[in-house]
Amino acid sequence: MSTTPTAPTKPTTHTSFRGWGSGLLAVAIFSGSMPATRVAVLGLSPWLLTSARALIAGLLAFVLLASYRQPWPRARQWHALLVVAACCVVGFPLLSGLALQHMSAARSLVFLGLLPLSTAIFGVVRGGERPSAAFWGFALLGALAVGGFALGRDAATSALGDGLMIAAIAVCGLGYAEGAVLTRALGGWQVISWALVLSIPFALVGTVAFWPLAGLGGVAPASWLGLGYVSVFSMLIGFIFWYRGLSLGGIARVGQLQLLQPFLGLGLAAFLLREHVAPSMLVATLIVVGCVAGAKRFA
């Protein structure tokens, strides 16, 4: 990698609080990503969805960078930006979109519950962080709580879908950690913006290549709304707060907030779609909140 991992300085109480606040806002935004992706792939292919969302977000990021006249990243930072682009702009959206063609959104919660562990592991490898043994205990317990709850809701399995989601979680954790390390020098919104701009050529070629010959006249409005959400919020705005949170509060620490993402998503589904919320969800949510608090305390 291009950026040399260094042991991060211990965050102060003020910066840690701001980091957790930014991280929580980002998780709230990300919680709508999987439902929006699921709706979008009903009318758009995962390949076109990945390309189109990256192109839309990339053009918005270009306008943002130009408006604030941001200096170009240094030569050694481009390699890290390429990793962020490959993992977060292309890898996770494409792999999760393909996986959702073979599994329900509920089952994908099993794997989202593993994302904090993936982020923490890469935070150790790339960010030089050294969480305590108690932290890892709370992180594992939170992942098991999320996974057990999701498996209880949807027992249907797909080897291909599961494999794609495992790969998606791995590349996403790497992209989160790499971007957080770079944020310390470049800034949170600048990192995701430059990564998106770097992806514009790929996104443009992909959008043209995967544009259906029959056109998009039959695509339902819900799919367009899903595309709009993942392009503007999941791909750009959410990452601005997320990288800021990881940088200020610590990659492994703030990354545990992702344990709340599946439950926030289910809460949105219950509120917007009137889906039933089982008592087991409330029990699992309390366990997860306790794990997040414990991970924060012992990080």
Image (spheres, rainbow, N blue to C red):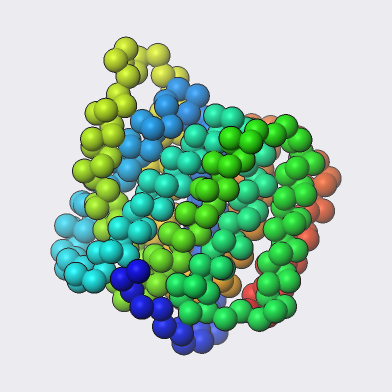
Quarter of the image where one finds residue 295:
bottom right
Q: Nearer the viewer, residue 252 or 133?
A: 133
**Residue depicted at x 75% and y 42%:** 151
In the image shown, does 146 or 287 lie closer to the viewer? 146
Residue 249 position within the rendered picture, expressed as x and y whole percent measured from the top left: 51, 75
Taking the spot 48% from the left edge, 28% from the top edge, the residue there is 41
Q: Is residue 225 visible?
A: no
Image quadrant where one finds the N terminus: bottom left
Q: Is residue 170 above or below residue 22?
A: above
154 over 287 or under it: above or below: above
Q: How many marks?
A: 0
- Please name whichever residue, 28 or 137, is drawn nearer the observer in this view of the structure: 137
Taking the image as shown, residue 5 lies to the left or right of residue 253, namely left
Spot occupied by residue 79 in the image (x, y as percentages of width and height): 28, 64
Left or right: 219 as drawn, with respect to 161: left
Instruction: Between residue 151 and residue 229, name the one nearer to us.
Output: 151
In this rendering, the answer to whether 202 lies above or below 275 is below
Q: Is residue 204 left or right of residue 29?
A: left
Q: Residue at x 82, y 47 (%)?
A: 280
Q: Residue 161, can we see it?
A: yes
Query: What residue sits 66% from the left and 81% below the top?
Result: 132
Position in image of residue 281 (x %, y %): 77, 47
Horizontal side of residue 22 vs 148, given as left or right: left
The location of residue 122, given as percent across then percent down, is 51, 67
- Quadrant where the C terminus sits is bottom right
Residue 284 in which image quadrant: bottom right
